[in-house]
Amino acid sequence: MEKTVSDAIKYRRSVRKFDSKKDLDDDLVKKCIINASLAPTSSNLQLWEFYHITDKNLLSKISKCCFNQPAAKTAKQIIVTVVRRDLWRKRAKANLIFFKSKKNSLSNKQFKLTQKYYKEIVPFVYKDFLRILSLLKYLFAYIIGFFRVMYRQLNHSDLRIIAHKSAALASQNFMISMAGFNYDTCPMEGFDSIKVKRILKLNSKSEINMIIGCGIRLEEGVYGERFRIPFEKIYYKR
Ligand SMILES: Cc1cc2nc3c(=O)[nH]c(=O)nc-3n(C[C@H](O)[C@H](O)[C@H](O)COP(=O)(O)O)c2cc1C
């Protein structure tokens, strides 16, 4: 039976050694990727792609690019979460089409708001030219910010962070879903992104958010007890 969310969160550990004798069900892993795609995403732009690697040859190539760290080397499958900031126009258009198809169930005001959001606000935030436009927008927001509350995440690195935040949330959805089925994962950022992009023939504008080794844990694959900073040192109620 699938675990409750709290149980899955507790069960999830970064597993570095997976059982070579236990395989994963591709469809179940795919179901967890579908859950990943249900994560919240900034402006609902879904600037992500998920690569589900099951081919042994590819697994070995990717493991090499992860420095053959145990979580990659022993992984039965690997998921690569990819950020595609360059797709913002297409995704905004997809949202527009979606809201047009739902026009009858929206009030006129709601419908107009969605149109304005995806036709004006999203392009204002995402449009860039050689990083100059985003810098100008950032400076503009900085000045206006002296006089009123202002949205400021407008420069090139802000936009990267926004897209990576959403992709990381999707990755977490994936890992929790896997834990729900007693499957294990290990998120990795120790990898050669250029080589992985080449191996997976990714679009040049792609950015790899996370590589996730997947399998079923060996007890020695969990490196000791979970350590967390005492909660009272990180929790502030105001
Ligand atoms: C963004 C990110 C990158 C990580 N990169 C690696 C990695 O390259 N190799 C690895 O073995 N673990 C990696 N980890 C796993 C962390 O070391 C692990 O989450 C942390 O020690 C806490 O342990 P837990 O996940 O078992 O609770 C990464 C975790 C995150 C969130």
Image: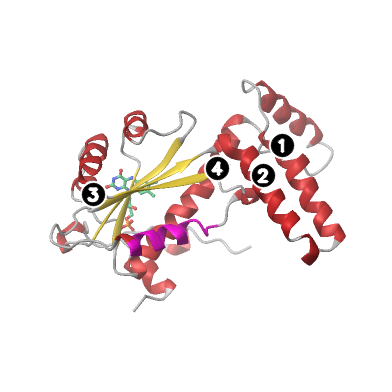
Name the kind of residue labelled 1 in the image.
Pro
Looking at the rendered structure, the secondary structure element under dot 3 is: helix
Q: Assign a secondary structure to mark 4.
A: helix
Amino acid carrying label 3: it is Ala
* Residue type at numbered disc 2: Ala
Judged from the image, the secondary structure of the residue bearing numbered disc 2 is helix
Return the residue at label 2.
92
Disc 4 packing (10 Å; few <14; some 14–19; many ≥20): many
The image quadrant of residue 180 is bottom left
Q: Is mark 3 within 8 Å of ligand 1?
A: yes
Image marks 2 and 1: residues in contact by CB distance under 8 Å: yes
Give the residue at mark 3: 71
Other residues around mark 2 within 10 Å, as few (<14) / some (14–19) / many (≥20): many
Q: Which residues, given as a range, are shown in magenta?
A: 27-39
Q: Disc number at residue 82?
A: none
Give percent across and percent down for residue 155.
Answer: 64, 31
Q: Nearer the viewer, residue 86 or 189?
A: 86
Answer above or below: position of 236 versus 67: below
The answer to the question of whether label 2 and label 3 lie on touching residues, with beta carbons closer than 8 A, is no
The N terminus - image quarter:
bottom left
N-terminal-most mark, 4 or 3: 3
Q: Which residue is mark 1?
A: 123
Q: Are marks 2 and 4 in contact (CB under 8 Å)?
A: no
Relative horizontal placement of residue 135, taking residue 56 as reference (left or right): right
For this view, does 134 lie left or right of residue 176? right
Disc nearest the viewer among 2 and 1: 2
Where on the picture, by quarter, is residue 129? top right
Q: Residue furthest right?
A: 108
The CA span between labels 4 and 3 is 25 Å
Gap in angstroms between the C-alphas marked 2 and 4? 14 Å
Residue bearing the label numbered 4: 163
